[in-house]
Amino acid sequence: MTDQTLLSTLRGQLEDERARLEAQIAALEVGSDGTYDDNFADSGQVTAEQSENLALLNQLNDQLDEVNHALSKMDDGTYGICEVCGRPIAEARLEAMPATRFCIDHA
């Protein structure tokens, strides 16, 4: 299990990441109200941009889910344990990817 100083540092990073992701999601949701300039001639371009925004929004929501999952694992004392093999995840991997669920062998 990781030491308390590292856990505290990683929790801070995860909470910062959560705030960043929530802000990005909120900005995309506000910008995706489905309206566009009536003078815009290429509705295909509008559709393409809306599709890109939706894909980005889905990706950000997935990342937010991973961050929230990691924070939940910290709260219940199972953070840093591989969800496949049950062995501890290396501290270097946690530092590089604080929201990871898996050890390097199962990544």
Image (cartoon, rainbow, N blue to C red):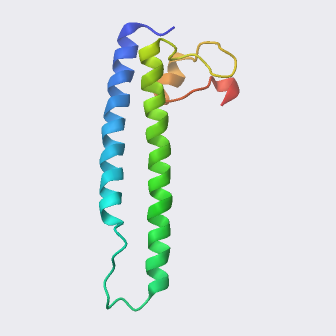
> Which residue is pictured at 35% across the width and 11% down the height?
5
**Measured along the vertical axis of the image, is residue 21 above or below residue 38?**
above
> Which residue is pictured at 47% across the width and 26% down the height?
70
> Which residue is pictured at 68% across the width and 22% down the height?
84
Name the side, left or right, on which 17 lies relative to 63: left
**Measured along the vertical axis of the image, is residue 58 above or below residue 89?**
below
Identify which residue, 81 or 73, lies in the foreground: 73
Identify which residue, 71 or 107, lies in the foreground: 71
Identify which residue, 80 or 22, lies in the foreground: 22
State which quarter of the image contains the C terminus. Answer: top right
> Which residue is pictured at 29% across the width and 47% down the height?
23
Quadrant of residue 53 within the rendered picture: bottom left
Q: How many marks?
A: 0
**Measured along the vertical axis of the image, is residue 75 above or below residue 26?**
above
Name the side, left or right, on which 79 lies relative to 87: left
**Where residue 69 sits: x, y (%)?**
48, 29
Quadrant of residue 35 within the rendered picture: bottom left
**Where residue 46 sits: x, y (%)?**
43, 79
**Where residue 79 sits: x, y (%)?**
50, 17
